[in-house]
Amino acid sequence: MDTAGVELSRIEAMGAGGLVCLVGVAWLLAPRWTRSAGRDFARQYGVQISPEFLGEFEREQVRRARLTMIISLPGLLLFLVTMGEHSFLAMAAPGLLALPVLAEMIRRVARAGSEFTAAPGRPGLARTRTPGVLDYLDRRVVVAHAAQAGIGLTAIGSALVTASRTGWAPDAAGAAVTGLLIAVVAVVGPVVWHLEVGRPQRATDAAHLYLQDAWRADAMRSASLLAGPGTLTALRLQDPSSSSSLALAAVQLVLLAASATCLLIDLDPETPRFRKRLWPTLAPGEVLVPGQSIAGRGAA
């Protein structure tokens, strides 16, 4: 009887059971965790949410948190369990952490323009111009996405170099998968932004339109989420035993430098960009109250 195999199966079963319990606890506690996230959102963007949209806002926050937890926790656990290994799963684990970002982007495109919808027949508020991506995001965020695409492509390149010398070993294939996922998410991001800002915003008053702008700006700023998988990829490829040449070591240093840049590049500004670009007549710290009129001030 292979007792080692039985013991390994028990460990795997315990790990799977622990993961299920962890995801279950995260699912149940998501509403509590997102309360603080909602307060942070309101404070950061200067938003006062109308009771008409408060329930929808809270549900969307909880849904976001649960989706991220359910998809990212297995990937994070896999990354931790496979540290020090050179298997396919060990090298693919950082890429799997990019899947929550991709899933959220797809969801945003499907829902863009329909968040916080008012009851039919309500009077509408129209903008004086159509907003663009740069009304919500600084160019540095675009640079961050370009850097992340470079991280993904460099990971693919390092996998190809390794495969040309030793064949397509599982670790090389895993690195290629991680690089592909990170590159895809980095390229999809700007496409999603363009689709989002192209959807019409139907608002009943200034506070309603401002809430949509704040939500859109917050959802579009995904560069900081992308930095995590990119950094983990770079760190995983830094294993000396996988560095077969000086050129590959240089590639790994480029990965680390690009990842560090992405971590620092998307710092929260004191005043949100959309507020300066789309709501220039609002005084510093001014919060729009639901039902408040801004006629004659030229905002929005």
Image (tube, rainbow, N blue to C red):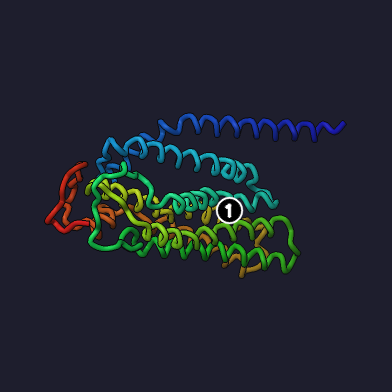
Q: Where is residue 281 in the image (x, y as percent from the top left)?
A: 16, 56
Residue kind at label 1, given as amino acid type: Gly
Q: Relative to the observer, which residue lies in front, 231 or 100?
A: 100
Q: Residue furthest right?
A: 1
Residue 164 as seen in the image, left or right of residue 158? right
Q: Is residue 203 above or below residue 150?
A: above
Q: Where is residue 269 in the image (x, y as percent from the top left)?
A: 29, 54
Q: Quadrant of residue 64?
A: top left
* Residue drawn at 71 percent across, 65 percent down: 163
Query: In the rendered view of the protein, which quadrant contains the C terminus?
Result: bottom left
**Mark 1 falls on what kind of element?**
helix
Residue 120 as seen in the image, left or right of residue 59? left
Is disc 1 surrounded by few (<14), some (14 to 19) or many (20+) residues within 10 Å? Answer: many
* Residue drawn at 34 percent across, 61 percent down: 138
Q: Is residue 74 above or below residue 279?
A: above
Residue topped by disc 1 = 95
Q: Which residue lies furthest to the front in this view?
A: 121
Q: Position of residue 36 (x, y in %)?
A: 35, 35
Query: In the rendered view of the protein, which quadrant contains the N terminus?
Result: top right
